[in-house]
């Protein structure tokens, strides 16, 4: 399994300057390669990124002599990324052709191959610029595959991709747990525990709006506008950090303490299209939670099962399997007409996700159609565990 650890850097001013140049180079090469591709493609020629890269390499040091100052990994990588982007477009996975990257609008990053750097303790040695201080040590032990240096507002990070043997950690022995996700309560566990999310964006929205307004009122290109942009970016980063921290703590706790984990396969993309809900949905970070649960369950040796999204987990009685005809969303507590058990809506749903005895296997004892079939994470094929973004 490949995991990546993102660590904050403490670069010197000189190193920061090099980082900016390397990011600019990566962006330049991407744009150059994309323009070349578009040109050939529109002419009707059959082309590929390998061909374009060969052409670029043959002329680069004559046409762009300044490239010599930047390590070649930064200008070799964009071709592979562009190849992937086109592949995604042609296979229909991504809508829209790859776009040109614009300074200040795109993600600033560049790549370093594994044989070009070394990492020991709190120091990473990068090509051209030498040792850079790390804020913390690398958390994973294993073979380091690659590094990506990136910028987030005024801070620099390095993401180290590490190959880790699967199930290297002692597998957890805790009982199975079902997790019901919601907007009002972030997660309700089958053992009755309710976990509230910090929802940082909701709280900070006012402040964010004010900063954004202040930014747009400053004259374009002015020093004040730059300062306002930085303040806005820092606020966004703070919000992202709060969310990330909460999700990591939650998913680590779950995957370390439960041998089996059951979640619902939420159609996050579809739900987020609902304009009234979309912000709240992105704010709680369901997709990120799912991604973390997938790789952490592999890491800690627990088993994650994703239930079909059409499985009526809240309408099915977790005691006897009776399916309620209607159960409006406003009903938070209900009593089963058959076995007289009173259920908390969300806890009942979480219990249903966990147990494989009731509900989803088809027709129940009352001749009612259960619902969908249980599927495992690998069967849904939505997210490959351990993949790097
Ligand atoms: Zn019942």
Image (cartoon, rainbow, N blue to C red):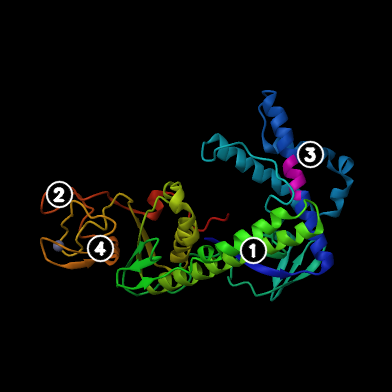
Q: Residue at x 11, y 64 (%)?
A: 339
Q: Quadrant of ligand 1?
A: bottom left
Vertical side of 99 occupied by 18: above or below: below
Q: For residue 123, what is the image quadrant?
A: bottom right
Instruction: Where is residue 16? Give x, y as percent.
Output: 79, 63
- Taking depth in this image into account, of 138 and 108 the one nearest to the observer is 108
- Taking depth in this image into account, of 266 and 30 the one nearest to the observer is 266
Label 1 secondary element: strand
Confirm whether the magenta stretch covers residue 264.
Answer: no
Mark 2, residue position:
368
Mark 1, residue position:
160
Kindly report which numbered mark, 2 or 3, lies closer to the viewer in this rendering.
2
Measure the C-alpha gap from mark 1 to mark 3.
28 Å
Measure the C-alpha gap from mark 1 to mark 2.
52 Å
Q: Residue at x 27, y 63 (%)?
A: 332
Instruction: Where is residue 341? Give x, y as percent.
Output: 15, 67
| The furthest residue to the top | 44
In magenta, the rendered stretch is 26-31
Mark 3, residue position:
56
């Amino acid at each position: 399994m490949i995991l990546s650890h993102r660590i904050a850097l403490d670069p010197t001013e000189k190193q920061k300057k090099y980082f900016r140049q390397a990011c600019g180079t990566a962006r330049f090469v991407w744009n150059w390669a994309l323009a070349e591709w578009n040109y050939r493609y529109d002419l009707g020629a059959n082309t590929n990124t390998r061909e374009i890269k060969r052409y670029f390499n043959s002329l680069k040091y004559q046409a762009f002599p300044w490239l010599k100052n930047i390590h070649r990994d930064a200008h070799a990588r964009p071709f592979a990324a562009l190849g992937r982007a086109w592949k995604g477009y042609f296979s229909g996975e991504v809508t829209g052709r790859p776009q040109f990257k614009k300074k200040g609008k795109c993600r600033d990053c560049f790549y370093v191959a594994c044989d070009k750097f070394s990492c020991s303790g709190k120091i990473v040695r990068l090509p051209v610029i030498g040792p850079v201080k790390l804020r913390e040590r690398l958390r994973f032990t294993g073979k380091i595959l690659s590094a990506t240096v990136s910028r987030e507002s005024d801070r620099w990070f390095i993401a180290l991709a590490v190959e880790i043997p699967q199930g290297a950690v002692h597998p957890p022995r805790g009982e199975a747990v079902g997790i019901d996700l919601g907007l009002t309560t972030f997660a309700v566990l089958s053992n009755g525990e309710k976990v509230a999310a910090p929802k940082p964006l909701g709280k900070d929205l006012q402040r964010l709006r004010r900063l954004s307004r202040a930014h747009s009122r400053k004259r374009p290109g002015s020093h004040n506008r730059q300062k306002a942009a930085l303040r806005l970016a820092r606020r966004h980063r703070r919000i992202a950090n709060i969310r990330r921290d909460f999700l990591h703590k939650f998913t680590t706790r779950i995957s370390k303490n439960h041998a089996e984990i059951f979640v619902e396969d939420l159609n996050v993309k579809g739900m987020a299209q609902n304009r009234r809900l979309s912000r709240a949905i992105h704010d709680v970070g369901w997709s990120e939670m799912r991604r973390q649960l997938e790789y952490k369950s592999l890491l800690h040796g627990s088993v994650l099962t994703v239930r079909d999204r059409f499985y009526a987990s809240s309408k099915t009685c977790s005691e006897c399997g009776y399916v309620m005809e209607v159960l409006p969303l406003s009903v938070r507590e209900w009593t089963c007409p058959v076995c007289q058990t009173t259920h908390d809506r969300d806890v009942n749903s979480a219990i249903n996700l966990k147990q494989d005895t009731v509900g989803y296997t088809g027709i129940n004892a009352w001749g009612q159609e259960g619902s969908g079939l249980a599927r495992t994470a690998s069967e849904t094929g939505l997210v490959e565990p351990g993949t790097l973004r």
